[in-house]
Amino acid sequence: MPGVKTAGRIVVLLGAPGVGKGTQGIRLGRELGWAHVSTGDLLRAARRDGSVLGLEARKYMDAGKLVPDGVMVDLVREHLAGLGSGRGVVFDGFPRTVQQAEALDRALAPEREVSAAALLDAPEAVLFKRISGRRSSPGGRVYNVYFDPPRRDGVCDETGEPLIHRTDDQPDTVHTRLAVYREATAPLIGYYEAKGLLVRVDAEGDIDQVYAGLRAAVADRKPAADRAATGS
Ligand code: AMP
């Protein structure tokens, strides 16, 4: 059928920092057999490798600011090229600006397009506590001083090692990250709503409830061109 896009679906996860895009995106990718692309993870890997990109990104990330659009678009375009077009993709943390969303649309065309943008929604006060309360052990065990505290302040229950409070999880930086979300990223809600692609998912409940809402909202959606062609 002319105009029908048969390649793998593309789902974008939208939502403020701390809303659970990473947890939900990994699970959605695993259960659907799709690639999970987290630009935060790609940048953290670049930092660990000590690459030029990693060094450049570091100052923005530690301050809770966005890495410039040009850098992000090149990174994602390169990553997408390596994935092949048959596979679905869950984007987590990209796009984060309208410019990035437009660049993603251009990078996907003409074979593919975004099939849904799922907005994970939770009150900002909850998100602030989720992120600023996070502490992790060097081995990767994660606590939260508000919701899941260690038995002794600042010490891992399992290993006795001191817990780490990441630079970008410090309260001032969290305020910046939430403000950046409101100013630069929240306009994407209108961007995808205007295209008829936005689905809202309540992200305040437990992980399984949120996942059930997300799965139901996105999995069966088809790209707009298919919907137009089939009338569904
Ligand atoms: P995340 O793990 O998605 O919260 O990303 C961590 C940090 O990486 C963000 O606070 C930004 O500094 C940077 N980052 C990740 N994705 C993007 C993006 N799409 N555009 C700009 N900066 C990004």
Image: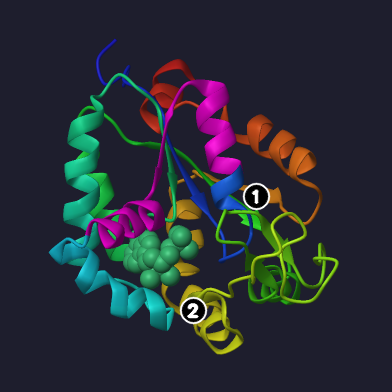
Q: Mark 2 is on which residue type?
A: Thr
Viewer can see residue 139 = yes
Q: Residue furthest top?
A: 1
Looking at the rendering, the stretch of residues picked out in magenta corresponds to: 24-49
Q: Is residue 109 visible?
A: no
SS state under label 1: strand
Q: Which is nearer the eye, 37 or 116?
A: 37
Which residue is at a point 30% across and 80% down the rendered structure image? 59
Dividing the picture into quarters, in which one does residue 148 lie?
Answer: bottom right
The residue at which mark 2 appears reads as: 167
Magenta-drawn stretch contains 221: no
Left or right of 59? Residue 91 is: right
- Residue at the limit of the structure toward the front, as seen here: 160
Residue 121 occupies quadrant: bottom right
Label 2: state its secondary structure: helix
Q: Residue at x 56, y 60 (%)?
A: 15
Q: Is residue 189 left or right of residue 70?
A: right
> Quick check: is the Cβ at mark 2 less than 8 Å away from ligand 1?
no
- Ligand 1 quarter of the rendering: bottom left
**What crowding class fits label 2: few (fewer than 14 Cα within 10 Å), some (14-19), or many (20 or more)?**
some
Residue 206's x, y, as percent? 80, 48
Q: List the residue tagged with mark 1.
A: 200
Q: Residue at x 35, y 59 (%)?
A: 44
Quarter of the figure that contains the N terminus: top left
User: On screen, 67 above or below 32?
Assistant: below
Residue 28 highlighted magenta (yes or no): yes
Number of labelled discs? 2
Give the class, few, some or many, for how many residues have Cα within 10 Å of label 1's Cα (few <14, many ≥20).
Answer: some
Q: Residue at x 66, y 58 (%)?
A: 142
In this rendered view, identify the residue nearer to me: 91 or 113: 91
Left or right of 199? Residue 209 is: right
